Image (cartoon, rainbow, N blue to C red):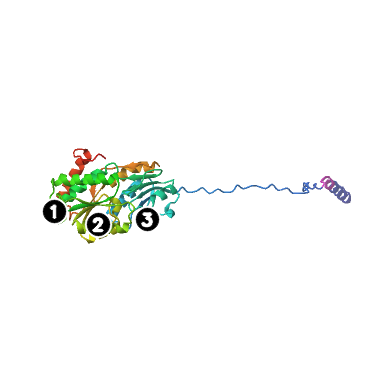
Amino acid sequence: MKKELFLILLVALLLTGCDNAAPAEAEVPAAPATLAFTETVVPESTLTPIPTIPLALLVIPADTDQETSDIYQALVYDLAQSAGMRFQVRNTLTQADLEPSLRVVIVLPPDPGLMALAPAAPQAQFLSVNIPDMVAGGNLSVLANTDRPDIAAFISGYIAAMITEDYRVGSMLPKDEILSAMTKTAFRNGFDYYCGACTAFIFPPWCTLTPCYPQYIEVPAEEDPATYNAYSDFLILQRQVETLYVAPKFATPELLTYLSSNGIMVISDFSPTKKYGNWVTTIQPDVVQGIVSAWPQLVAGAGGVNITSPLILADVNSEHLDAGKEANAQGVLDQLQAGYILTGVNP
């Protein structure tokens, strides 16, 4: 009986094992015969240029006296800062300075060649300050008092008569120019306005007619600047002139040094780049106010114009023109510009 029961259990176990079939293998997808890769194009990076800050230049000679240099540098620095510009100072100006970011150039005498440099930098506006023989046009503007040269000549004659012993004054003028005749007449009228006849107390031996002064020497336009000293000798040695009005075109450093070494007092409407002991005063436009007035149009890219400013007494040497005489002369100058005093010349 036990043997039969064992057989029955064994058969049952075998039947149960046959019902549990082995699990089927998972199907693996067939690999493609060839793998295809798609190239991804990465766009090239583009560098964004950093905007260049516009540049304003002040060109002022290295031998300019420190006080004057400081005034101009502070002025143009403040103007440049207010316009969001960089500011630099140069003692000279060359083609190498005309960088693309250049926008405003303010140039004091002597002339670095502006008539050629300005067209080479059309992106910039140039302002010539009291440089003789400049012609406005294109991107070159000219700051000067060119509309009334007779006023500068009149007040120069007035001051010369006021400060010179025995009225021994003269002027050095360009020859064969309408401007020369105008300057000569206005200078004489200013001289007379101060003292009437202005007759010398001691008559020079060469003087046969009164008044003996003012004396004049005219220099031809084509004359070599090296000869200017010799022309001045006529007035100094032969005519005993002690105060001399020098037309701007003749006010070279060599002549001014020569006159100073001879003790001749000098008045001009050209501002020297350095101080001379014999310098009396410069009759010139109010340069500071002129630059301030011109600045907005320079920044705006507008140029090629003449800019006039009221005349003032600058570079005053108090040793020759003390405070009282300076106030006297400035008062006459103000009246001339207001039309209350006439120069006697129709400019």
The crowding category of the residue bearing disc 2, from other C-alpha atoms within 10 Å (few below 14, some 14 to 19, many at least 20), is many
> Over which residues does the magenta segment extend?
16-21
Q: Quadrant of residue 165?
A: bottom left
Instruction: Residue 34 in the image: state x and y as whole percent.
Output: 76, 49
Q: Which sits in the foreground, 294 or 280?
A: 280
Query: What's the residue type where badge 1 is placed?
Result: Asp
> Label 1 belongs to which residue?
166
Q: Secondary structure at mark 3?
A: loop
Q: CA distance from mark 3 to mark 2?
A: 30 Å
Residue at 43% from the left image edge and 53% from the top image edge: 95
Whichever of callouts 3 and 2 sits on the residue coming sooner in the sequence is 3
Q: CA distance from mark 1 to mark 2?
A: 19 Å
Query: What's the residue type where badge 2 is placed?
Result: Ser
> Label 3 belongs to which residue?
92
Q: Are marks 1 and 2 in contact (CB under 8 Å)?
A: no
Q: Which sits in the foreground, 280 or 31?
A: 280
| Residue 177 is a magenta residue | no
Asked whether the viewer can see residue 289, the reply is no
Mark seen at residue 232? 2
Q: Secondary structure at mark 1?
A: helix
Instruction: Residue 194 in the image: state x and y as whole percent.
Output: 15, 46
Establish if 90 lies above or below 338. below
**Disc count in the image?**
3
The crowding category of the residue bearing disc 3, from other C-alpha atoms within 10 Å (few below 14, some 14 to 19, many at least 20), is some
Q: CA distance from mark 3 to mark 1?
A: 43 Å
Is residue 256 left or right of 168 when viewed as pictured?
Answer: right
